[in-house]
Image: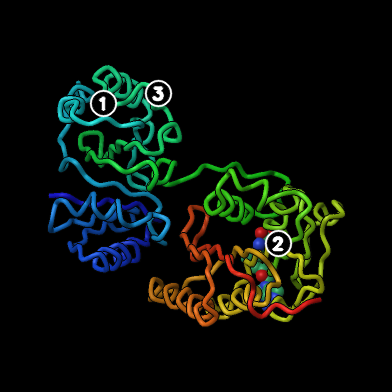
Amino acid sequence: MTSIVLFCRPGFEKECGAEIQEKAAWNEMYGYLELKKNQGLVFFHLHESAHGEALMNKLPLKRLIFARQWFVTVTDKIDLPDYNRVEAITEVLGNDWQYSDLRMEMADDNDGKSLSKFCRKLSVPLRQALRKNKVLTQKGNNSADDPEGAILHALFLSGQEVILGFSLARNSSPHVMGIPRLKFPSASPSRSTLKLDEAFLHFIPRDEWDERLTSGMNAVDLGSAPGGWTYQLVRRGMMVTAIDNGPMAESLMETGQVKHKMMDGFKYIPLKKNVHWLVCDMIEKPQRVAKLMSEWLLHGYCKEAIFNLKLPMKGRFQQVTNDLQAMKDAFALHNLRYELYAKHLYYDREEVTVHARLLSPAPLSTKE
Ligand SMILES: C[S@@+](CC[C@H](N)C(=O)[O-])C[C@H]1O[C@@H](n2cnc3c(N)ncnc32)[C@H](O)[C@@H]1O
């Protein structure tokens, strides 16, 4: 049987499963779900084997909100011996297929954490053996080397059990289990800073940073206190208008790059319309935030927006789908071309992060 294995935040398996099942059905591919509760793992077992690869080819991972990483299985669960695990894996793989990289992965729970050390140790001899057998291509230390290549995934359920599979380099996360390990900058006033750092990494291609994420730009941060997100904008050389009734960290105010306005983020309208980035981390009803973001974009108050939609306790997938649909409807009303992607990022908790920008001129924009 072929399955798609998806990695998500532990506790969000239901949402991740519902989403893949829905998107597969849109493509007339069907299967059933096996959720590994609180392990951050979802198995989507497909009724037709060929649909695993077909779905990977058709559906961009970036279209999935709750899945951080995925692969299609090429084996069922393999029982490994206590010794010669490398030989056991290489034997199963043969050398019919070549891969440009290897990802050793595990559940995102405590058992997974204890397995990660074991995996790190095993990965060195396994890589060597796979290279020798020409299963891993020589250059393949990094999937960026070969965007058209396939990535080999080894999902360890324990030290004795592994499932092997593959993903397409151009349509999978470059990070093991889809988790980027970011360093917390000690100068930031809050840990939330990592959410915006990850969002920029995830949504904005590196080769476009010079144009879209660069020094001298103006930004607005709604719900900015104490300043973790503002810190990310300041460190990229931007001038930031920070909106929050709460206090901003002195260290940020001292940079001279931040103007703090103590007011309601729903009432603030920028005087000048040269704001490139609008970012918003206000703890508010997600439908209110989505509406506000649409208004900013439609009026041309900003060029791009990154914002959080806080998730409710129940019906999380439905809620976020509805909020995004409301934004799409607002853009469609004006026949606009746009980009709108949402992701439950690693540093998000009970929220998803959204990136939106219009590719058409803002229809409600008026001259200053
Ligand atoms: C999660 S915190 C933001 C943390 C911030 N992004 C950081 O990295 O330090 C949410 C903030 O939203 C602010 N907030 C909530 N509703 C707001 C509103 N209507 N207008 C302005 N700020 C609001 C709160 O005062 C709070 O400081």
Q: Is residue 209 visible?
A: yes
Q: Report the disc number at residue 336.
A: none
Q: Is residue 225 visible?
A: no
Looking at the image, tell me whether mark 3 or mark 2 is earlier in sequence order.
3
Q: Residue at x 45, y 46 (%)?
A: 179
Is residue 298 or residue 287 the one in the foreground? Answer: 298
Q: In 3D space, how far apart are the residues under numbered discs 1 and 2 (Cα atoms)?
A: 46 Å
Q: Amino acid at mark 2?
A: His
Q: Report the disc number at residue 135.
A: 1
Q: Amino acid at mark 3?
A: Lys
Q: Report the disc number at residue 139.
A: 3
Looking at the image, tell me whether mark 1 or mark 2 is earlier in sequence order.
1
Disc 2 element: strand
Is residue 177 or residue 189 the one in the foreground? Answer: 177
Furthest-top residue in view? 132
- Residue at the disc numbered 2: 276
Q: Residue at x 71, y 54 (%)?
A: 233
